């Protein structure tokens, strides 16, 4: 079919003969989708190739002729429908030549299901006294959550926002300050990771729809927890995708007006890459990003696979396949989000070690606040999973601790488990350490060693749901968390809680873990011991500014092990992962307070000796 952008279509809407039905008049409302006004609802949709567009629904007995829309400039169609109201269902009826297409509204906030009808939403909601502000980035601890499996009973359908709300006191007490929700936009069926959005503006009906999301965000804020939404702009669908050839036009076997219709359409998830160069599609994605902050009061976004927004194959250094309009789209949206919501956090999952992802747009960057850091997760997981201590690469661990983007420690998100790292042929860290023996001493010791590194290294630490009580095997969208493990592994859970509280300086003794600064002052690749100094502010000798972390990454405990110290005085043990209170099978290698002795060591003016258990971390600070 020929694209009407390149030809003239005549839409007769001029004078009407006496006695005939008057032509439809454009909506007086602004915006897209279903637009409520006193006494009715306006409808507006973009369908530039349609010969005619009608809206049919429960408000007109699903008539296929009763309610045509008026054509507007730019390929938009709109009309006001008195009597339509929230709760009514509808679809657009699009006619293009001999095609008659029944379509869900691209801007649908609510649908009956992924192949059902659009629901006119009731957008009223009592937010009460919610005036939540996201914690500073250096105090964030993120918890990645999948709503369908977070709090659910196997065999009873997926979990939802209401079941998740029940566990918010648990997350608050754990010390979590921010939840990052895997995508919940309407997808086919009831079970999915969420990275196949069929209706990008609609909230998954199985999760409870728009009202349930608002109740979830409000409840999170009441518990002092921020919310980040995982958005998928690198592709759409591909299943149950009404946007596909939405108004009947396509070329090259492509997807029509919302998608590239050439080689740029191809992604690892199907040929459904949005057309970032088309103004109406750019506006659609921008409106989607803003929706979550404006309508649902979330505190930021996590963008999925941004490498595939800026390059067809997700590559760096490949200008022939770069998508320049994809880069400019990210810049445009991030600039607007930061202008309107200066406290929001926009995170990129790019995983290509590209510093320009987090550089400001006025410096040519994409303008993200932070990005997931592959420079941390891969070398640290490798060090944890390697069976033979002799092959543990301490220099790789050192580099993982030191890495940063744009000279800012908190522009990276660091973790040992994420949805990508615990599925698709990979498993949870304890399972990787000893398959089938996640409760073994080795699995417990080395997985918690990794958690301690993530929660003491510079960066924004993130946990994946259930990590804190050794959830076993791997992530599956129909395998809910086993909450009995929170009791069975109560000691390990306590360890995570202690680490998070220290990371946030809730005890008032570890302010250095909130600071920008790190120095690896001791690295023994033979003994597999590393010690690093964290401090806050310009003066590491200021009272309470410094924290020392020592990690033993071998199966052998060490005694009277000497390290350098930056300041004189007593250094108190704030954390010892070998404590038997965390697990009765741990060795309880006692580490007493250290009194610094004068004398250069590790490039520092003071030194002291301590004991460290096998596969253990010790955290020291001064009063």
Image (cartoon, helix red, strand yellow):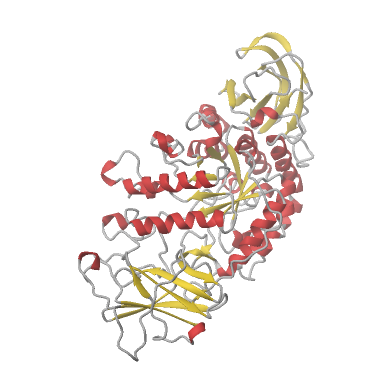
Rendering coords of residue 117 (x, y %): 49, 76
- Closest to the observer, 567 or 220: 220
Residue 345 sits in quarter: top right
- In the rendered view of the protein, which quadrant contains the N terminus? bottom left
- Image x and y of residue 271, in percent: 33, 60
Q: Which residue lies at the image location 48% right of the left edge and 78% below the top edge?
A: 81
Q: In the image, is residue 143 above or below residue 587?
A: below
Tell me the quarter of the picture where residue 443 sits: top right
Q: Nearer the viewer, residue 561 or 478?
A: 478
Total label count? Answer: 0
279 to the left or right of 5: right
Look at the image and tell me whether residue 206 can be seen: yes
Query: In front: 226, or 84?
Result: 84
In the image, residue 68 above or below residue 559: below
Residue 362 position in % (x across, y down): 41, 35
Question: What residue lies at 66% left-to-right and 33% top-to-bottom?
Answer: 615
């Amino acid at each position: 079919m020929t694209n009407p952008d390149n030809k003239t279509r005549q839409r007769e809407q001029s004078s009407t003969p006496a006695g005939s039905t008057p032509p439809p008049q454009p909506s007086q409302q602004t915006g897209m989708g279903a637009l409520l006004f006193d006494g009715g609802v306006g409808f507006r949709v973009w369908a530039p190739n349609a010969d005619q567009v009608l809206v049919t629904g429960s408000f007109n007995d699903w008539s296929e002729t009763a309610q045509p829309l008026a054509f507007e400039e730019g390929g938009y169609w709109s009309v006001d429908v008195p009597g339509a109201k929230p709760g009514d269902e509808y679809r657009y009826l699009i006619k293009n030549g001999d095609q008659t297409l029944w379509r869900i509204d691209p801007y649908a906030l609510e649908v009956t299901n992924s192949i059902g009808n659009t629901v006119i939403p009731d957008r009223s909601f009592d937010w009460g006294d919610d005036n939540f502000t996201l914690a500073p980035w250096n105090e964030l601890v993120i918890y990645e959550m999948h709503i369908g499996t977070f709090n659910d009973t196997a065999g009873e359908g997926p979990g939802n926002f209401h079941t998740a709300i029940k566990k918010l006191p648990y997350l608050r007490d754990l010390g979590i300050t921010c939840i990052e929700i895997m995508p919940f936009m309407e997808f086919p069926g009831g079970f999915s990771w969420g990275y196949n959005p069929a209706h990008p503006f609609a909230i998954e009906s199985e999760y409870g729809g728009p009202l349930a999301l608002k109740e979830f965000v409000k409840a999170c804020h009441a518990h002092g927890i921020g919310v980040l939404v995982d958005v998928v702009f690198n592709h759409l669908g591909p299943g149950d995708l009404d946007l596909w050839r939405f108004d009947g036009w396509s070329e090259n076997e492509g997807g029509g007006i919302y998608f590239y219709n050439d080689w740029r359409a191809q992604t690892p998830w199907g040929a459904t890459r949005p057309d970032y160069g088309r103004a109406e599609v750019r506006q659609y994605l921008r409106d989607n990003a803003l929706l979550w902050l404006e309508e649902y009061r979330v505190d930021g976004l996590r963008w999925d696979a941004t490498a595939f927004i800026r390059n067809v194959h997700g590559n760096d250094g490949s200008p022939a396949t770069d998508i320049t309009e994809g880069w400019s789209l990210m810049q445009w949206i991030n600039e607007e989000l930061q202008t309107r919501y200066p406290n929001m956090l926009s995170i990129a999952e790019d995983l290509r070690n590209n510093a320009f992802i987090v550089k400001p747009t006025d410096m040519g960057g994409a303008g993200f606040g932070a990005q997931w850091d592959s420079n941390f997760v891969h070398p640290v997981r490798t060090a944890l999973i390697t069976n033979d201590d002799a092959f543990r690469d301490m220099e790789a661990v050192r580099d993982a601790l030191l890495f940063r983007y744009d000279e800012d420690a908190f522009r990276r998100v660091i973790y040992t488990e994420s949805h990508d790292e615990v599925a698709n042929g990979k498993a949870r860290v304890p399972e990787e350490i000893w398959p089938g023996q996640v409760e073994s001493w080795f699995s417990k010791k080395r997985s918690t060693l990794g958690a301690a590194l993530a929660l003491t290294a510079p960066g924004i630490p993130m946990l994946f749901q259930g990590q804190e009580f050794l959830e076993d095997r791997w992530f599956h969208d129909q395998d809910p968390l086993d909450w009995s493990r929170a009791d069975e592994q109560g000691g390990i859970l306590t360890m995570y809680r202690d680490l998070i509280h220290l990371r946030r300086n809730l005890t008032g003794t570890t302010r250095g873990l909130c600071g920008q600064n790190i120095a690896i002052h001791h690295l023994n690749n033979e003994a597999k011991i590393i010690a690093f100094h964290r401090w806050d502010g310009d003066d590491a000798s200021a009272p309470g500014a410094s924290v020392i972390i020592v990690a033993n990454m071998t199966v052998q405990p060490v005694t009277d092990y000497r390290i350098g110290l930056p300041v004189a005085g007593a250094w108190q043990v704030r954390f010892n992962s070998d404590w038997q209170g965390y697990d009765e099978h741990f060795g309880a290698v006692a580490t007493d307070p250290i009194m610094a002795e004068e004398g250069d060591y590790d490039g520092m003016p003071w030194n002291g000796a301590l004991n460290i258990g096998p596969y253990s971390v010790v955290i020291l600070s001064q009063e």
